[in-house]
Amino acid sequence: MKKIKIEIPKYDLKSGILNIRITEEKGDSSTVSVDYKTLLPFAISVNPEVRDFFFVTCSVYGIDRFVNRKQHSVDGWSRELHISLPVSEVKIWNNVRCDLEELFSFLTGDYWQIDFYKSDFINPDFELPIDFKEKFKQVNLFSGGLDSLIGAVDFLSTHPKNKILLASHYDPQMKGPLTDQNVLLDKLKAKYTGLFDNVPSVKVTLSQTTTRRETTFRSRSILFIGIALLISEGKKINKIIVPENGSVSLNYPLSSSRRTSCSTRTTHSFVLDKTNLVLTKLNIVSNISNPYEFMTKGEMVDNCNDLEFLKQIIGFSNSCGKRGHRAHWKDLNASHCGFCMPCIYRQASLINQKDPTTYGNTINSLIPFNTKKSQDVGTCLDFLKKDITKDDIKTELIVNGVKNINKLNKYVDVVCRTRDELSKWISKNGNSYIKTKAGL
């Protein structure tokens, strides 16, 4: 088990950077650097538990990057992590310790054990800029992806008398998201002038480490929520929207081997429900929800409230999970790899539209499917070929963490419609071999 201490955050007035040092009992260390100056105007007016929650999410993100899975996993993926975290009131945080352990374990696929100790962090005084003194209806997470773009367009095109505040995060070690966000924000500003504001994208990164960084980012979503929470509570907005299609939120395992290590859970209902429970126990008012949890990605696109505008700017959004690994792309200048599951979902979702996205590979150029780059496509085809009943899907969803039985039948329907969406796309674009592999 890796024993790790998170030191009390230290803010540098000159640079505006908050540094959170991570130390491991055997001597390795890392530093999470946060562009805290951007968030200071909001952080000054929230209760200490909100700031603590944000610091915890930054720390979890840093630990996730600090502890390399290959070196420290107990089963090829999962790590055993014993973490000591600084908080304002230890007694209050002990009430949610078990919930946080469950949340982080589910989110990252690791075994988390958490202890708390007293923090003496004092938030610097900072006045809220004039831009953010207006009233906002809600905070929307804005990642630069297609779903978050649809979430913004849907609200802006139907609420001309209400404003929203967009919150974003980027890590310079992940090339692309900041550029995507800025380009899309310019497009939105030109169309919906004066209807929204955006907090400048907050940089959070592992700026220094004595060991090899982990390359997975499973904890990014909880950091995103931590940023949005600080903004929401700072402005007394209390409503945080995480726009994500139900297919990706559920991330139904395409094979039994993908139940844990290969199944990302960024907006899974368990994650959002457990996070809301933690906030309630901490007496934090803000609530997090995903209004698209019962929709496929294609349904999000086709039902967008301003579809004509969306079609004009779809190509500026990015859904690719492997955009930084271009060695095997046939078109090295493409914006998407074309063969990771996020790319596959994207292509299937745009079957009823003219897709302006450029893809590095097509599904027909990846045969055979026994290589690392093509395994997502192969697994997807195998999944579509299987004869799966609704009862099978229901059982798998429960095994994969769905706890809210009242929503279960709707989730089953989302999986069924997702299969249909993928099958239609493959029927239209796959060659005879691909179609046979998919049972079509």
Image: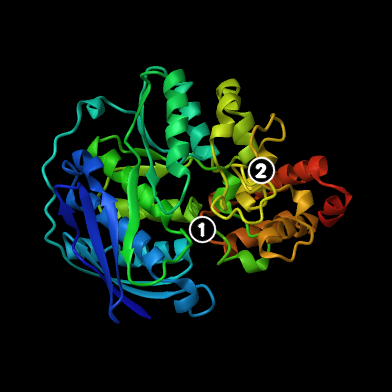
Q: Nearer the viewer, residue 378 or 110?
A: 378
Q: What residue would you read off at disc 2?
A: 359
In percent of width and height, residue 243 lies at: 49, 39
Q: What residue would you read off at disc 1?
A: 403
Is 429 displayed left or right of 415 in the figure? right
In percent of width and height, residue 65 lies at: 40, 64
Going by the numbered disc 2, the residue's amino acid type is Tyr
Is 259 displayed left or right of 422 in the figure? left
From the image, which quarter does the N terminus lie in?
A: bottom left
Q: Quadrant of residue 156?
A: top left
In percent of width and height, residue 95 lies at: 26, 64
User: What residue do we see at 60% from left, 49% from top?
Assistant: 342
Q: Is residue 123 above or below residue 19?
A: above
User: What residue do we see at 57% from left, 55% from top?
Assistant: 325
User: What residue do we see at 36% from left, 66% from top?
Assistant: 63
Going by the numbered disc 1, the residue's amino acid type is Lys
Q: Is residue 273 visible?
A: no
Q: Is residue 325 above or below residue 195?
A: below
In percent of width and height, residue 264 lies at: 53, 58
Q: Report crowding for label 2: few under 14, some 14 to 19, many 20 or more residues within 10 A (C-alpha).
A: many
| Residue 225: assigned label | none
Q: Earlier in the sequence, mark 2 or mark 1?
A: 2
Q: Is residue 197 visible?
A: yes
Q: Secondary structure at mark 2?
A: loop
Q: Secondary structure at mark 1?
A: loop
Q: Quadrant of residue 375?
A: bottom right
Q: Given this view, does label 2 or label 1 mark the residue nearer the observer?
A: 2
Is 214 displayed left or right of 239 in the figure? right
